[in-house]
């Protein structure tokens, strides 16, 4: 029952999904190759339409990666020098990195000890701190849907409304997750995601997207992703007898989703809901069997996670990591150094009561292999190995 499986164990087994989707992906990719519409081909528009629908948003705008996806709304809203943008420190670098890109000042907020997502109390205290100092204008909150589950959007969006701040949901890990059956766009001004291959909805390279309910924001971001080209709103009441992409209305960037990636994503999105179900079965079994040995994940009430990671807490997590490696089981610690302790982020401010939960979590979290195609035998072996380690620890 708990013998080591024949096949090497993947942390995220992309090959299993590749095999499952098979010929459909080959056909989708070859259609693009044969059409030669490599940039902004019809699959890009088609995928944007389907993605918006899936995320319960009016519109979706694809781009080159999940980092640009967070930068685009900040640029579209004119966020810059003198503005404060709030985000967690317990996240992947991209969330914080784009704040200095636009010249704004980042403010790190602590997370909750159970869900690891933004602590609304720490957020409100940080906003009050910035207001009291009187130097910066609070503008935007970037909440992160860490490890696949949604942040507490009812509480966070209420704070954003109270102080007149915009809300971005950085859903690179959480796209597809819901709270009370609703996707983040029910509360947020924008939801961003990444199609990096290892994310729950990944492509075969880099890719990203922004979801919005604002046609105006969509148009400006469409302009920004293609070098600030003129869009419909820019051309109203004026004549330009050339391609509007050569009339440049703002400083933009080059951030498009390749047509090939859009074609791959159309096939992946078709099975995504089913994969979310499979991920939840794997997570439920981990919860059931490991609950007595270590701290297993807490999902926000009425939330459904997409389980980008299955993360447990253990005092001796480095010991577990080494033990699992010996047994051929990969694991990872996200994130061992929180952003506020990284050199380039020393100019960021931090919430008034510090970031004690963030600091604690960085030392105890460890993520186990998680993907929709994990077979029972493999999971049994992983569970038995984690138990073996935990039981040996307790008997010391
Ligand atoms: C992966 C990730 C991003 C960035 O996505 P890329 O496509 O790699 O640029 C942003 N935020 C979070 C929380 C992520 O996990």
Image (tube, helix red, strand yellow):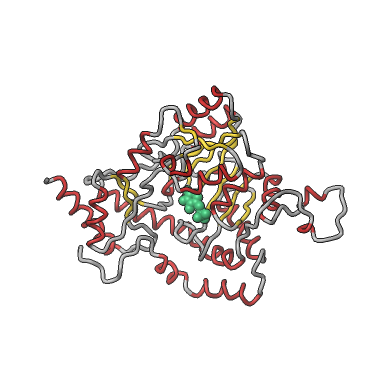
Q: Residue 267: where, in percent of width, then height?
A: 53, 65
Image quarter hosting the N terminus = bottom left
From the top left corner, tell me how far across and down residue 160 is, in percent: 56, 32
Q: How far across and down, in percent of the image, does residue 163 sit?
A: 58, 28
Q: Nearer the viewer, residue 120 or 291?
A: 120
Quadrant where the C terminus sits is top left
- Considering every residue shown, the one lying at the far bottom of the view is 34
- Number of numbered discs on residues: 0
Res 195 visible: yes
Q: Residue at x 54, y 53 (%)?
A: 66
Say whether residue 261 is left or right of residue 110. right
The reply, left or right, for residue 312 in relation to residue 196 is: left
- Residue 157: % across, % down: 54, 34
Q: Is residue 270 visible?
A: no
Is 4 located above or below residue 236 in the figure? below
Residue at image location 83% in from the left, 61% down from the top: 242
Residue drawn at (35%, 60%) of the image: 11
Q: Nearer the viewer, residue 321 or 377?
A: 321
Front residue of this view, candidates 134 and 380: 134
Left or right of residue 47: residue 394:
left
- Name the outermost residue toward the top: 132
């Amino acid at each position: 029952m708990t013998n080591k499986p024949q096949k090497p164990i993947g942390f995220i087994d992309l090959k299993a999904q590749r095999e499952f989707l098979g010929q459909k992906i080959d056909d989708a990719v070859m259609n693009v190759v044969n059409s030669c519409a490599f940039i902004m081909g019809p699959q890009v528009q088609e995928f944007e339409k389907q993605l918006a629908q899936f995320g319960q948003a009016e519109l979706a705008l694809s781009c080159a990666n999940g980092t640009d996806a967070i930068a685009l709304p900040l640029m579209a809203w004119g966020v810059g020098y003198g503005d404060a943008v709030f985000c967690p420190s317990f996240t992947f670098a991209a969330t914080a990195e784009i704040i200095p890109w636009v010249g704004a000042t980042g403010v790190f907020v602590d997370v909750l000890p159970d869900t690891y997502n933004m602590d609304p109390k720490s957020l409100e205290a940080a906003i009050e701190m910035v207001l009291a100092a009187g130097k910066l204008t609070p503008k935007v909150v970037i909440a992160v849907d860490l490890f696949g589950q949604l942040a507490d959007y009812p509480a966070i969006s209420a704070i954003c409304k109270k102080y007149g701040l915009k809300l971005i949901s950085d859903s690179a890990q959480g796209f597809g997750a819901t709270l009370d059956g609703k996707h983040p766009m029910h509360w947020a001004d924008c939801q961003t995601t990444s199609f990096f291959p290892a994310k729950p909805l990944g492509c075969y390279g880099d890719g990203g997207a922004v979801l919005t309910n604002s046609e105006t924001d969509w148009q400006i971001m469409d302009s920004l992703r293609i070098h600030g080209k003129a869009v419909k709103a820019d051309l109203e009441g004026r004549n330009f007898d050339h391609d509007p992409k050569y009339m440049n209305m703002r400083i933009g960037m080059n951030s498009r989703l390749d047509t090939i990636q859009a074609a791959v994503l159309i096939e992946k999105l078709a099975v995504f809901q089913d994969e979310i179900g499979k991920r939840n079965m794997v997570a439920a079994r981990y919860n059931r069997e490991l609950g007595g040995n270590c701290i297993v994940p807490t999902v926000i009430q009425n939330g459904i996670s997409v389980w980008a990671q299955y993360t447990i807490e253990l005092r001796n997590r480095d010991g577990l990591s080494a033990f699992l490696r010996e047994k051929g089981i990969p694991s990872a610690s996200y994130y061992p150094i929180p952003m506020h302790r990284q050199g380039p982020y020393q100019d960021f401010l931090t919430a008034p009561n510090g970031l004690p939960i963030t600091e604690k979590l960085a030392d105890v979290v460890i993520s186990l292999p998680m993907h929709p195609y994990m077979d029972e035998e493999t999971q049994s072996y992983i569970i038995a190995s984690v138990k073996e380690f935990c039981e040996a620890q307790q008997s010391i």
